[in-house]
Image: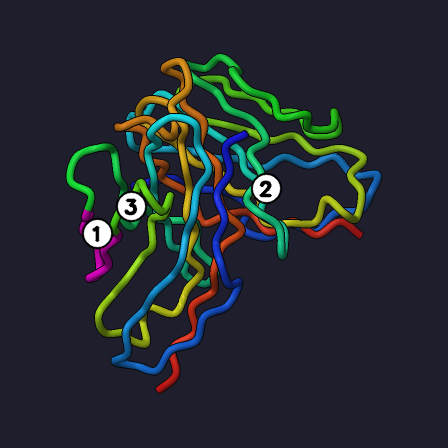
Amino acid sequence: ETGVTQTPRHLVMGMTNKKSLKCEQHLGHNAMYWYKQSAKKPLELMFVYSLEERVENNSVPSRFSPECPNSSHLFLHLHTLQPEDSALYLCASSQGLAGGPLGELFFGEGSRLTVL
Amino acid sequence: AQSVTQLGSHVSVSEGALVLLRCNYSSSVPPYLFWYVQYPNQGLQLLLKYTSAATLVKGINGFEAEFKKSETSFHLTKPSAHMSDAAEYFCAVSPRMDSSYKLIFGSGTRLLVRP
């Protein structure tokens, strides 16, 4: 496996379910991110982890709970979601924080979430 | 506040025609600027970036962009469109405040290429 891998690629869940999205990067990077991509909206940064510590939480509702057990893995735990949370969730990694001269973001293919 | 504006949510060109995707930024300090591309059912991929070296930046797949400070622009161009260029393109700015970095994405421009 190379690059950034996200599972599952598609997820349908009810509002009372609990599920998790998984992201794994094989690039040796030290920062990982969760982004939300909704139709007709700019990409929304949700969480940033640098060296396994959360460095940014962009006012994300508590029904989204991130976990970064090591520098290669990132999870997004989901519970009691709302239909408006339906979106493509993108994981990314970088060496150095994104936006810096070395901080090119490498994205996974995303997990398409549908909340019924 | 720093921001980035992409003019035109959709741009349609004929195959072989010039591609021009517009990006304007707002930043109080010289920024870093990026273009990313997203093909259908895929994540975003870096096309090119400006980090204060040459103002004309060449990227992958024949794309290039020019940083114009006086116009606060970083437009993306390609001389001749190919069908495989059909995708969504995102401009992003990093204002480089206090040595911390924050990447701000535009809303994206969907490029359609007509045969």
Q: Are marks 2 and 3 on the same chain?
A: no
Q: Nearer the viewer, residue A64 or B21?
A: B21
Question: Badge 1: how crowded within 10 Å, few (<14), some, or many (20+)?
Answer: some
Is B94 located above or below residue B106 in the figure?
A: above
Question: Badge 2: how crowded within 10 Å, few (<14), some, or many (20+)?
Answer: many
Q: Quadrant of the C terminus of chain B?
A: bottom left
Q: Are marks 2 and 1 on the same chain?
A: no
Considering every residue shown, the one lying at the far bottom of the view is B115
Q: Residue at x 36, y 15 (%)?
A: B99
Q: Name the secondary structure under disc 2.
A: strand
Q: Is residue A86 left or right of residue B10?
A: right
Q: Name the secondary structure under disc 1.
A: loop
Foreground label between 2 and 3: 3
Is B33 located above or below residue A31 in the figure?
A: below
Question: Badge 3: how crowded within 10 Å, few (<14), some, or many (20+)?
Answer: few
Task: Find residue A36 and name its label.
Answer: 2
User: Label 2 to label 1, Cα distance in Å?
Assistant: 26 Å
Question: Which portion, as a residue range, is magenta?
Answer: B56-65
* Residue A38 image position (x, y, % from top left): 63, 50
Considering every residue shown, the one lying at the far right of the view is A16
Considering every residue shown, the one lying at the far front of the view is B70
Q: Which residue is mark 3?
A: B68
Is B80 part of what is drawn in magenta? no
Foreground label between 2 and 1: 1
Task: Find residue B59 and name its label.
Answer: 1
Q: Residue at x 21, y 51 (%)?
A: B59
* Residue A54 image position (x, y, % from top left): 53, 16
Earlier residue among tags 1 and 3: 1
